[in-house]
Amino acid sequence: MVYKKLKREFYTQPTLVTAKQLLGKYLIRKFNNKELIGKIVETEAYIGPKDRASHAFRGKVTKRNETEYLEGGHIYIYLVYGMYWQLNITTNIKGKPECVLIRALEPVTPVQDMRIASGPGKLCQWLKLDKSFDKEDLTKSKRIWLAGGGGQIDENEIIATKRIGIDYAGHYWANKPWRFYIKNNPFISKR
DNA sequence: GTACAGATTGAG
DNA sequence: TCAATCTGTACT
């Protein structure tokens, strides 16, 4: 399998486009001279000041969400519930607080528990991701990056459905079909 | 210095 | 369905 590192142009596309194209791509994490590789099978889009579920709702800039405003291709990582990290990838151009949450990976590197990355909190534990990855540039980093492998996922293999865990944002936003996953893939997060 | 929210998870 | 659990952020 030939891995082609994704370039800046991939990330600066509209968020919903990038979110869908991210499916089937590979996340490579270099750790202790070993490479942990996972295929992205589930994503969620968060779109800027409009989206009530986004941290950047109303365009407010805080220390916590300033990363979201960076140009596409950066990591936005943040802690929820005091115990789980969320791995996001910023999208679109600088100044647009849009990003894609990586919700689940299918381990390519052999692991004991193959569902070890089936959930946004779990995949960060597996890959040993923490605050130090905030603002990491995926096009330059030597320890984490994304690559394309076997080609695009077919359009009708992609399921779009409502996002998870954001009921507080109200029905309108909570029901937006901005969660994408690969049809019949056993590694998506279960609920 | 203190209050408080929170893009989850697993068990029941 | 429900509570555990705790850091960073945003206030005073």
Image (tube, coloured by chain):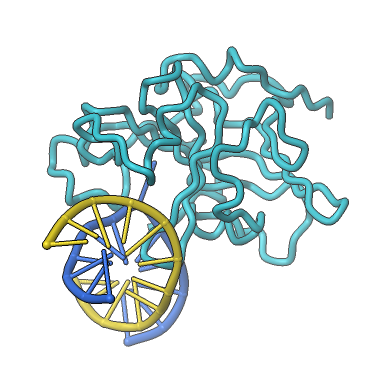
Chain colours: A cyan, B blue, C yellow
Q: Position of residue A113 (x, y in %)?
A: 67, 65
Q: Nearer the viewer, residue A108 or A157?
A: A108
Instruction: Tell me if residue A86 comes above or below residue A88 in the rendering.
Output: below
Is residue A57 left or right of A12 when viewed as pictured? left
Residue at 53 percent of width and 47 percent of height: A104
Quadrant for the C terminus of chain A, please.
bottom left
Which quadrant holds residue C4?
Answer: bottom left
Residue at 32 percent of width and 48 percent of height: A164
Quadrant for the N terminus of chain A, please.
top right
Count of labels shown?
Answer: 0
Q: Position of residue A94 (x, y in %)?
A: 44, 19
Q: Nearer the viewer, residue A38 or A79?
A: A79
Which quadrant holds residue A26?
Answer: top right
Q: Position of residue A30 (x, y in %)?
A: 78, 46
Instruction: Tell me if residue A18 comes above or below residue B11 in the rendering.
Output: above
Is residue A93 left or right of A133 when viewed as pictured? left
Is residue A85 left or right of A3 when viewed as pictured? left
Is residue A86 left or right of A141 when viewed as pictured? left
Residue at 40 percent of width and 36 percent of height: A66
Instruction: Tell me if residue A153 comes above or below residue A132 in the rendering.
Output: above
Q: Position of residue A56 (x, y in %)?
A: 29, 35
Q: Nearer the viewer, residue A87 or A25?
A: A87
Residue at 54 percent of width and 20 percent of height: A11
